[in-house]
Amino acid sequence: MGINERKEREKELLQKSILTAAREVFLEKGFDQTSIRSIAQRIEYSPTTIYLYFKDKDAILFALHSEGFQLLGSKLEVLYTVENPYERLKAMGRIYLQFAADHPDYYDLMFVQKSPLSNLEDDELWKEGATSFDGLKLTVQQCMDEGYLPFKDAEAGAYFVWSALHGMCNLYDRGRCKVLDPEKSEKIVDLGFEELIRMMDSFRK
Amino acid sequence: MGINERKEREKELLQKSILTAAREVFLEKGFDQTSIRSIAQRIEYSPTTIYLYFKDKDAILFALHSEGFQLLGSKLEVLYTVENPYERLKAMGRIYLQFAADHPDYYDLMFVQKSPLSNLEDDELWKEGATSFDGLKLTVQQCMDEGYLPFKDAEAGAYFVWSALHGMCNLYDRGRCKVLDPEKSEKIVDLGFEELIRMMDSFRK
DNA sequence: TTTGGAAACTTAACAGTGTTAAGTATATTT
DNA sequence: AAATATACTTAACACTGTTAAGTTTCCAAA
């Protein structure tokens, strides 16, 4: 009998529409304004219904965070065509910064907010982050192998590069670039990235 | 008549005790748990009294944020004795990282949370941040002058260095180091800093 | 010394948050 | 037709920042 299957489909549909509503509210109103009640209102269900489909608010945020990683992943796909690891690393950085600028809310969810990750157990792997980081680590390792970078450890080197990019995005997003010459502060992320490249370039050239 | 002066003193006293209570709650329970009501309870006044001494919650957070800068500033004082700018820069970095590790809550307030800075007008200078950044910028400029660093622009260079340090602290604090080898993740901030130094060293040596 | 008024502080409330226990209506099975 | 399982809602709890209105306290002038 197809009744159970229809019900199953309907349940999945509602779960998806909750997620869609959450995404809409999140992208329109931002992280702070994304409340269970505002999501519920959008799908015209009571707030408590949401708890029948998601464990808690963090579970919804985790799902959105995963969407963000999918989006970033899709942007990074073009890198497969870049054979030179150092060129690939630089392109990776540009795409990362562009993503952070284009989707600051997703970025925050992926790399700053603690709540989405509260979904993970203490010993559980953060799959989304690990996949992205492994890609970076591999590229850094290749750069080291081919003498482009002076790092001692590829993992620490990759973490350093990631930190530099993340730091620039986060300081900008959190209004800490007020300390800069106002004229520069608009394009400071790009200027900072240029200095990183200059620094990396200076090793070999 | 000294009555008005006594009242003035009493007002100042209460303002200070609010701040003390806020600091205690903040350091004991953390940012999220620092509510107006919890502060009020500690000084045994009603929550609304706090609004007679501070415009809003952000004004209290701003005051605590300033305390954090004073604390960091006191740690950075020893740098005056370091004449070589490159050595000074490296020492600066170590102190900065140590501060972030020792006082994660203050650090968050100073460099991550948006709320404390909401106190500032749009065109108003972020004095605390600017003072610290100017110190860094000056040192970076001196490093450039003496051929230690390949940056083109001292401001962008200083921003890059700051971002690298901040990124490491923030990614660690926000649980994003789960992507790393668990064995390394504990000391990853130090390992990353070593790679930054290796990278800077590689320019001249 | 009593009255007037200002200053200091509190009570009660508003509008919001995440979350849960209990209740209701619907649909399926016995 | 009655019993049961499913889906959903209502009402509530314990919080949050903030404000309007009310109360108490204290000092100064009549």
Image (cartoon, coloured by chain):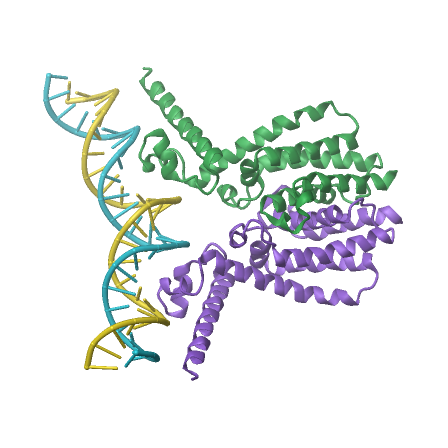
Chain colours: A purple, B green, C cyan, D yellow
Identity of the residue drawn at 71% across and 24% down: B80
- Given residues B100 and A127, the one toward you in this image is A127
Does the image show residue A22? yes
Does the image show residue A183? no
- Image position of A202 (left or right of A31): right
- Image position of B24 (left or right of C20): right
Query: Is residue B62 depicted above or below A74 in this figure?
Result: above
- In the image, residue A176 lies at what x, y percent? 60, 44
Query: Is residue A140 depicted above or below B166 in this figure?
Result: below
- Image position of A21 (left or right of B7): right
- Given residues B149 and B153, the one toward you in this image is B149
Identity of the residue drawn at 76% across and 44% down: B153
Query: Is residue A90 depicted above or below B87 in this figure?
Result: below
- Given residues A69 and A103, the one toward you in this image is A69
- In the image, residue B33 lies at what x, y percent? 43, 41
Figure quadrant of the N terminus of chain B: top left
Identity of the residue drawn at 77% across and 36% down: B141
Figure quadrant of the C terminus of chain B: top right
Q: How many marks?
A: 0
- In the image, residue A100 lies at what x, y percent? 63, 57
Image quadrant where residue B184 sits: top right
- In the image, residue B2 lies at what x, y percent? 33, 15
- Image position of B156 (left or right of B99): right
Q: Residue furthest top?
A: B1
